[in-house]
Amino acid sequence: PTFVWLHFLEPHGPYTPPDEDVADFLEDGLFPDERRIPRQPLDSEEPDGKLLGAIPRYHQLDDEDRVSVFVARYDAEIRQVDRAIGRVLQRLRQKDLFDPSWVVFTSDHGESLGEHDYFFEHGWFAYEPTLHVPLMLKVPEQKKGAQVEGQVSLLDLHATLLAGLGVETGAGSGLLPGRDLFAQENRSETSLLIENSDGYPGKYFGLRTSDWKYIIRSPEGSEELYDLRADPTEEANVAQREGEHLARMRAEFQALIQRIEESPRVHAPQAAEDSAATLKKLGDLGY
């Protein structure tokens, strides 16, 4: 048995794709955004990635200030990854390993391309551009594809893979988060807890269903509510208008948090202290 993890840093800032790929996306007409935005001053005291309405320092490219150019470069990096994954799948087929293998494609986060005035970054907020990521699963000997409606969580991936391998996980005991996505009893819709990344100004927690999203900001307690069907870009906070729905989602959120706090937990081993070389690499990436 073999487990292989392939982590592609692209697409990720700074966007550095081949120039020949960028030209294709500049002319595709899919992102007709003519905005020009300021560049974060090099002597700015604001950390990279923790500012609004500007191009972070580590993204800056000569005198470029067009949003459409940065989006095209991001798209070109997606193409790079697409090609690389194609080569991996081709090699698996050549080695007769594709059919008997599990293959999973997903991402740890998305990217904000100007939504909520947040450009070419991720992690600060709990809005859809960061949270809504791809998840594709191919199980052994699968011949046909299907699209599954309803939301799932990356927490479900661990439980799904182990169940598929016949490993007893204790799922449902509170010791292992997530659900086996192929189990019939887990096909019903579930509400998911959401949270922004650590290390950003302000903490955002909340609850997401397929139709609605509830967000509460800590420590001040301000609340947001979005109707994702009518407003998929989360531009209209309807918390004041939809008081009854807000109260229901708030109560469900609080109940889930309480359940987590009262459940037994499995603690991961403490990580070793980061070396100077590791910290430099993270700094070069903008962290």
Image (cartoon, rainbow, N blue to C red):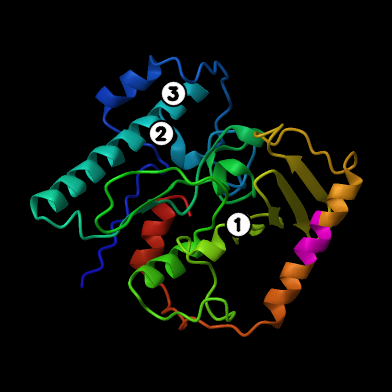
As displayed, is residue 2 above or below residue 149?
below
| Residue interval drawn in magenta | 249-254
Q: Position of residue 267 (x, y in %)?
A: 53, 83
Foreground of the two, 182 or 280: 182
Judged by its main secondary structure, the magenta piece is: helix
Alpha-carbon span between mark 1 and mark 3: 41 Å
Answer left or right for 78 relative to 223.
left
Please give the residue where the numbered disc 1 appears in the rendered image.
188
Seen at 38% across and 66% down, the residue is: 161
For mark 3, give the secondary structure.
Answer: helix
Depth check, mark 1 against mark 2: the one in front is 1
Q: Amino acid at mark 3?
A: Val
Q: Amino acid at mark 2?
A: Tyr
Q: Amino acid at mark 1?
A: Ser
Seen at 70% across and 78% down, the residue is: 261
- At label 3, counting other C-alpha atoms closer than 10 Å, the crowd grade (few under 14, some 14-19, many 20 or more) is some
**Earlier sequence position, callout 1 versus callout 2:** 2
Q: Position of residue 34 (x, y in %)?
A: 55, 15
Please give the residue where the numbered disc 3 appears in the rendered image.
69
On the question of residue 16 being in view, the answer is: no
Alpha-carbon span between mark 3 and mark 2: 9 Å
